[in-house]
């Protein structure tokens, strides 16, 4: 099978491949990477010169890999920063609510009661963070 791309479509594919590699393997050491993700990423990057995008992707012989340039990475920082920020504000209330329930020793007759209580506590944290950010979060000394 053959798939044809315009230069614009290939750039969009590069963006998607970079973000996929970043989120799939970005926190892993090279020997721990998901090989399937990394292999398709490398394959997509290998066509950069054919689309005159050598300014975005370089071949690094030392590692035998294609690498994004800093310029290319900077183009996608906004997506990553937004994701990180949104994830932080979604995860923080959820983790704190679960922690509070675990510490409380509350018992629940069923999963629905547990979830109701979890969402109730989570909503309080969300309201707090919406109004005050993390300005009123403190580590309590023992």
Image: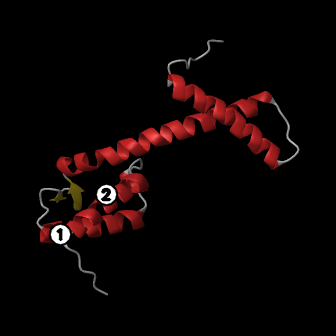
Front residue (pair 94, 68):
94
**Mark 2 or 1, closer to the camera:** 1
The percent coordinates of residue 22 (x first, y second) are 36, 53
Q: Secondary structure at mark 2?
A: helix
Residue most extreme to the bottom: 1
Q: Where in the figure is residue 65, as x and y percent of width and height? A: 24, 61
* In this picture, residue 68 sits left or right of residue 23: left
Element at badge 1? helix
Residue 44 vs 83, above or below: the answer is below
Determine the residue positioned at 74% across, 44% down. 115
Which of the marked residues, 2 or 1, is nearer the chain's N terminus? Answer: 1
Which residue extends farthest top? 141
Which residue, given by chain and number where applicable, does mark 1 sit on?
7
The CA span between labels 2 and 1 is: 16 Å
Q: Residue at x 59, y 29 (%)?
A: 127
In this rendering, the answer to whether 78 lies above or below 131 is below
Give me the residue at 20% from left, 70% from top: 47
Count of numbered badges drawn on the protein: 2
Which quadrant: the C terminus?
top right
Can you see residue 63? no
Residue 45 to residue 85: above or below? below
Give the quadrant of residue 96.
top right
User: According to the image, label 2 marks what residue?
Assistant: 18
Q: Residues within 10 Å of mark 2 (few under 14, many from 20)?
A: many
Task: Please say whether residue 101 is visible from this viewpoint.
Answer: yes
Residue 34, numbered circle? none
Name the colouring of the figure: secondary structure
104, 61: nearer the viewer: 104
Q: Residue 76: where, in percent of width, then height?
A: 28, 49
């Amino acid at each position: 099978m053959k798939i044809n791309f315009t230069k614009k479509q290939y750039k969009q594919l590069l963006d998607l491949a970079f973000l996929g590699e970043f989120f799939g393997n970005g926190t892993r050491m090279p020997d721990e990477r998901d090989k399937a993700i990394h292999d398709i990423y490398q394959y997509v990057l290998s066509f950069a010169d054919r689309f005159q995008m050598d300014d975005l992707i370089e071949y690094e012989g030392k590692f035998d890999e294609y690498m994004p340039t800093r310029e290319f990475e900077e183009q996608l920082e906004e997506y990553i920063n937004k994701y990180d920020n949104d994830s932080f504000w979604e995860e923080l209330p959820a983790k704190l609510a679960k922690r509070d329930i675990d510490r409380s020793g509350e018992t629940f007759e069923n999963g629905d009661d547990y979830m109701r209580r979890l969402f109730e506590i989570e909503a309080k944290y969300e309201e707090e963070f919406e109004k005050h950010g993390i300005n009123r979060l403190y580590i309590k000394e023992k």
